[in-house]
Image: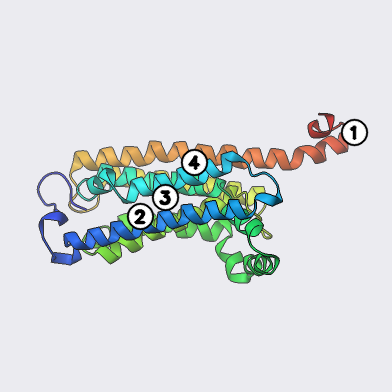
Amino acid sequence: MAGHGSGHVHPGGHGGAGGFAPSGWAVLDAAVVLLLVAAGVAYGMGLARARGRGPWPAGRAVAWYAGLVCAGGALVGPLAAAARTGFTAHMAGHVLLGMLAPLLLVLGAPVTVALRALPVGGARRLARALRARPVRVLAHPVTAAMLHGGGLWLLYATGLYAAMHASVPVHAAVHAHVLAAGYLFTAALVGVDPDPHRASVRVRAAVLVAFVAAHSVLAKRLYAHPPAGVAGDDARQGAQLMYYAGDAVDVTLMVLLLAGWYAATRPRDAARTGAVPWREAA
């Protein structure tokens, strides 16, 4: 990523060097737009096909499309262009793509939409796939946290950060990983879709606390030791954005995790004490 001041390489000014020809960026942008539009259309078609299976919460649909907008804002447009020449803009894109967009997309419950929209045979095959061992391993909070947090450490503590700004394919692969790992991590912690192997609240809470600590340590490290070629002021602003904006999303995850635990345990507590759950009382 190019930055402010000396020692930075501005990819837009070097034609085809390193694979950063303008045509390369145009192809990447077009591919991103097509994928986002396809995701939006597929979700809408799923809702339309499942219309006869009961109402769908409007908030879920809003969350899905808001998540696509966040991902699009990080990958295409002014912020994405600024992120190629500034670390602070890059970090804003990281928060959008790796934290906020995954949270909103998870809250959109796309797997549930697919299960409702598919014919019986297709829904059963999807359900079997979700129970497969590889999916079980990937969906475990510990694995998801390692992929998400470990990927960030690999990006900023090695030469990968420079490499992603010397090759459009590497740039695309890094961002695809950030979004996918962020989605997997968020779904493992607070997913609303069916999960036949969901970890206990204690495990998920412990993983979340560990991830928050690792994320905060990484932000502090970037503040003191930015990637090569990133100017001091830009690095400090980007690190602060990562620290404080990341905390805001992490707190939201904590609230959702606790809210899910409360909703799952309250009926049992009420039955144990002889009280009438509020749903039944209503």
Give the percent coordinates (x, y) of residue 254.
Answer: 56, 40
Give the percent coordinates (x, y) of residue 27.
Answer: 26, 62
CA–CA distance in space, label 3 to label 2: 18 Å
Give the percent coordinates (x, y) of residue 213.
Answer: 46, 45
Task: Name the quarter where the C terminus is drawn.
Answer: top right
Q: Are marks 1 and 3 in contact (CB under 8 Å)?
A: no
Q: Would residue 164 be found to the left or right of residue 99 on screen?
A: left
Residue visible at 44% across and 38% down? 247
Say what amino acid the circle numbered 4 marks.
Answer: Asp
| Lower position in the chain sequence, tag 1 or tag 4 | 4
Q: Would residue 144 be found to the left or right of residue 90 on screen?
A: right
**Residue 117, quarter of picture:** bottom right
Q: Nearer the viewer, residue 84 or 148?
A: 84
Q: Are marks 2 and 1 in contact (CB under 8 Å)?
A: no
CA–CA distance in space, label 1 to label 3: 44 Å
CA–CA distance in space, label 1 to label 4: 36 Å
Residue ID for mark 3 = 98
Residue ID for mark 4 = 250
Could you classify mark 2 by the number of other residues whose Cα lies within 10 Å: few (under 14), some (14-19), or many (20 or more)? some
**Residue 180, quarter of picture:** bottom left
Front tag of 4 and 2 = 2
* Secondary element at tag 3: helix
Q: Would residue 66 be found to the left or right of residue 32 on screen?
A: right
Residue ID for mark 1 = 274
| Lower position in the chain sequence, tag 4 or tag 3 | 3
Residue ID for mark 2 = 33
